[in-house]
Image: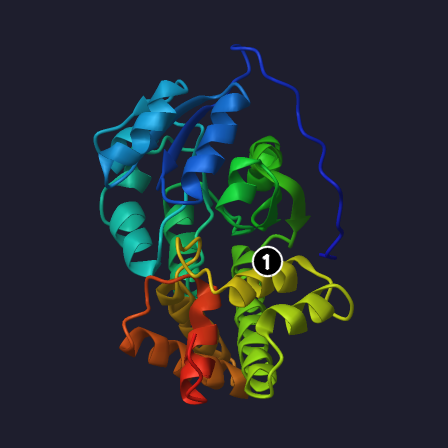
Amino acid sequence: MGLGLRQCRRPGRLTRSNAMRIGFLGLGNMGTGMAGNLIKGGHDVTVWNRSADAARPLAEQGATVAAKPADAATGADVLHSMLANDAAVREVILDSGVLDALPKGAVHVNHATISVALAQELIEAHEKRGLGYVAAPVFGRPEVAAAGNLNVVASGKPDAVAKVQPLLELIGQKVWPMGDDPIRATIVKIGGNFLIGAAIESMAEATTLTRAHGVSAADFLDVMSNSLFASPIYKIYGGMIAAQTYTPAAFKLSLGFKDIGLARAAADAKRVPMPFASVLHDALLESLAAGDGELDFSGLARVAGARARLKD
C-alpha cells in the first residue's frame, strides 16, 4: 500500500446518538490533552490513570473516572492508550484483563512509543480476541496535544483505521496513513524520535564548539534556526538549549534513552548499522549517570558542555 498523505478535516461536534464510548488509559503530559479533545468532540469518555489525581481535571470536563484499566475498557467502542514504555503497556494492556474486557469488534488505539517486538505481540493478542488494533503514535509536545494539533502516524487493518479516523482527527492536525501493518507506524515513530535525538545532539555539540570560541549558543542558534534549519525541532529545542531551560520536562531524557534503545533493538533485528544511535546512547547514558534523567531531552546539551569543561 502506498503512503498516500492527506490533510485531515476535523469533524463537527457529534450528537449523543452517534457519539462513541471511549476508554482512555494514561493521563500523563500527552494523554491528558488528547483525552480532553475527545471529550470536547462530544464522545462518552472513561479515563484511567495510575495516579487518580491526574483524572480530576478530565472528570470536571465530563469524563467518567475508572477505578482500574479494565473498567475503562468494558463496553467501549474504542480504547485509546498513551503509556510510558513497554513495561507499562505490558502491565496495563496485556496483564490486567483489559483486552478481555473489550467487546468483540472494539478497536484499541495505541499511541505509545513501543518496541517492534511488543507491537507484534499486541497484534497477535488482539487478533486472538477478535479486536482491532491500530498503532497511532504521535509527534508533538504537551501544549500541541492540548491544542489538538499533533501529527498522528496511523497503521492497521483498513476497517479498524476507518472506525477510529474521526477520533484521530480530533487529536491531530494531520493523520499520516502508513498502511495495513501496525508495525509500520511503530517503526516510523521510533525512527522519528531517533532523528529528534540526532538533531538535539548535533545542536549540543555545535553550540559547545561555538561557545568555546566565544559565540553564545543563543547567537549561533538564532542564525541556524532562522536560516539553514528553520524547522520546529531546531526552533523549539534550540531555544531551550540557548536559554538552558531544561525544566519542566515535556519529554524526559530518560524517555529519550528508552527510545534510542528501541531504535538500536529494531536495527539489530534487521542487521541495520546505526553508528550514530550508539553515539546518542552513550550521551544519554552519561546524562542519566549524572542524575539528569528528569530533565528535558534538550538537556543533552549539558553532556556536551561538561565534556568540554564549559560551565552552564
Q: Position of residue 293 (x, y in %)?
A: 32, 67
Residue at left offset 52%, top offset 80%: 270
Mark 1 = which residue? Answer: 236
User: 151 or 240: nearer the eye?
Assistant: 240
Determine whether the residue tagged by mark 1 lies in a helix, strand or loop.
helix
Q: Position of residue 37 (x, y in %)?
A: 52, 30
- List the single residue furthest toward the right: 227
Vertical arrangement, residue 156 with respect to residue 10, above or below: below
* Left or right of 187, for residue 306: left
Does residue 105 show up?
A: no
Q: Quadrant of residue 148?
A: top right
Task: Check the image and tell me how it is coloured.
Answer: rainbow
Residue at left offset 47%, top offset 36%: 33
* Left or right of 72, for residue 203: right
Q: Name the quadrant of the C terminus.
A: bottom left
- List the single residue furthest toward the front: 214
Disc 1 residue type (three-letter): Ile
Vertical arrangement, residue 116 with respect to residue 37, above or below: below
Q: How many marks?
A: 1
Q: Position of residue 182 (x, y in %)?
A: 53, 55
Vertical arrangement, residue 31 with respect to residue 114, above or below: above
Q: Name the quadrant of the N terminus.
A: bottom right
Label 1: how many Cα within 10 Å (few below 14, some 14–19, many 20+):
few
Q: Quadrant of residue 191?
A: bottom right
Q: Position of residue 122 (x, y in %)?
A: 39, 54
Residue at left offset 35%, top offset 76%: 287
Residue at left offset 41%, top offset 24%: 45
Does residue 311 show up?
A: yes
